Each structure stands twice: as C-alpha cells, then as structure tokens.
Amino acid sequence: MFKILVIEDDATLFGEIKDRLSQWSYEVYGIENFDKVLDAFTDINPDLVIIDIQLPKYDGFHWCRMIRNVSKVPIVFLSSRDHPTDMVMSMQLGADDFVQKPFHFDVLIAKIQAILRRVYNYSTTKPTIKTWCGATIDYEKNSISNSLGVIELTKNEFFILQLLIDQKNTIVSRDELMDRLWDDKRFISDNTLTVNINRLRKQLDKLELGKYIETKVGQGYIALEKEPSSYD
C-alpha cells in the first residue's frame, strides 16, 4: 500500500482527497501542525507528497525545498493560483507535477497513479548501472557520476535522462517524452517539459554533461555521445 502525505490546510478539501484516494487503497496522511511539516514527513516517510502552495506560516514552496533537501520522493503541487510562474517555480524546485484548482478527482488520481508507476515500477526492468559520455548512471540511486563528482536527480529528471539515453544519438520527440512522463498530456502545459529539460541540463552542467542533451528545434531532444556544437 502506497503512503501519500497531503499538505493541505483546507480541512474539507483534505477530507475529500483522503476519501477518494482511500477508495484506491492508498494510505493517506494529513498535517496537524503546519509548523512541523518536515517532522511529519520524516515520521510518515511517504511514497508521494501532495502540497498546496498557500499554507499557514510557510508556503508550499518552502516545504518543497525542505523535503528536497532530504528526499527525492515524488511531489505534486496543488494551487488555486493560475500564474505561470507558480508552475515554473514548482518544477524548478523539483516537483513532479502541478495540478490547478479546481480539479477533477479523476485527473488527480490518474496523475498520482502515473507517477507511482513510473517511480516505483520502471527500474525493475532496467539494468542497475549504465554508462554514458564517460559517466556512470545508477538506476537504483537515481544518480550520475564522473570524475567531477556525483549528482542525484529527481524522479522526473532521471526518467527524462533515462528515456533519452535509451535512444541515444536519436531524436526523441517532445510528444513522446510527454506521453511517457505524464499519461494524459492534455492536462500538462508544454512549458512543463521545457522546465524539466532545463532543470536536468542545469544539474548535468555540474558534471560538464549538460551540453550532451541537445535541442532539435521543432523535433525534440537528443542525448549525444559526441561533442555537440551547442544547445538551446
């Protein structure tokens, strides 16, 4: 049974989310003290976290940062705000998805199921270790390392890298990436993929590998194993 922590201060909405997710046999937890969200996270050790942006004292972005400091657990943001910067900020902080309020519960459940399948099932059919551009990729730890150091990626970042490397030196379309990352891309902004790609490159730049993820304008992205001229 997957454990889901819902960081939501609207008691009515939390109750509805808990009831719906419980029908799918998820174990749902809420927050009693919004000053101690990280303590609750540590105690519960959830498989997925849902965070509202507007919360008492500290907003959801703050708690996302705190959680990301200690865990790569999948995070889904909820928000009644419709400014594009909220989605961009969420993705830059390492969120796996963003759901706009008001939302249909079937959409939320579908997104949760897609993330859980991707995060906790895909690695069982893949090799544990792979190499790319002289770097070692650890599928169990979601990490990549070379002589410059080791970086750990979020689930989305690692999944994108995996998809590109599995088809290295071949263009992977934006549509294919979105289809694989999010089961129903009708509810995903095209900008969401761009943010995730840019975030992945920024991480890879720490190992001087970002240049090997190249944009093919109007086509998609390609993971190279040769020196690229540039990337967008």
Image: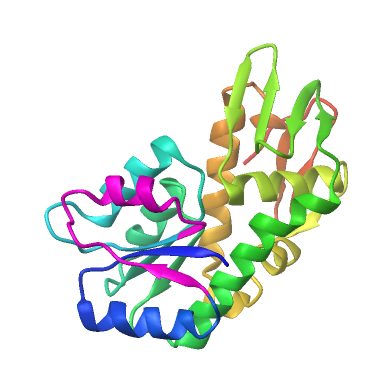
Indicate left or right for 151 with 70 as reference.
Answer: right
- Is residue 29 within the magenta segment? yes
Residue at 57% in and 23% down: 206
Range of the magenta residues?
Answer: 26-48
Query: Which residue is located at x 77 percent, y 25 percent?
Result: 136
Q: In the depicted view, which residue is nearer to us: 4 or 134?
A: 4
Task: Check the picture and name the quadrant holding the N terminus.
Answer: bottom right
* Position in image of residue 55 (x %, y %): 19, 62
Q: Is residue 137 above or below residue 170?
A: above
Q: Position of residue 75 (x, y in %)?
A: 46, 57
Direction left: furthest residue: 57
> In the shown orientation, is residue 160 left or right of residue 223?
left
User: Residue pushed farthest top?
Assistant: 147
Q: How many marks?
A: 0
Going 82% across and 33% down the picture, which residue do you hit? 129
Q: Residue at x 69, y 11 (%)?
A: 147
Which of 100 and 16 lies nearest the eye of the viewer? 16
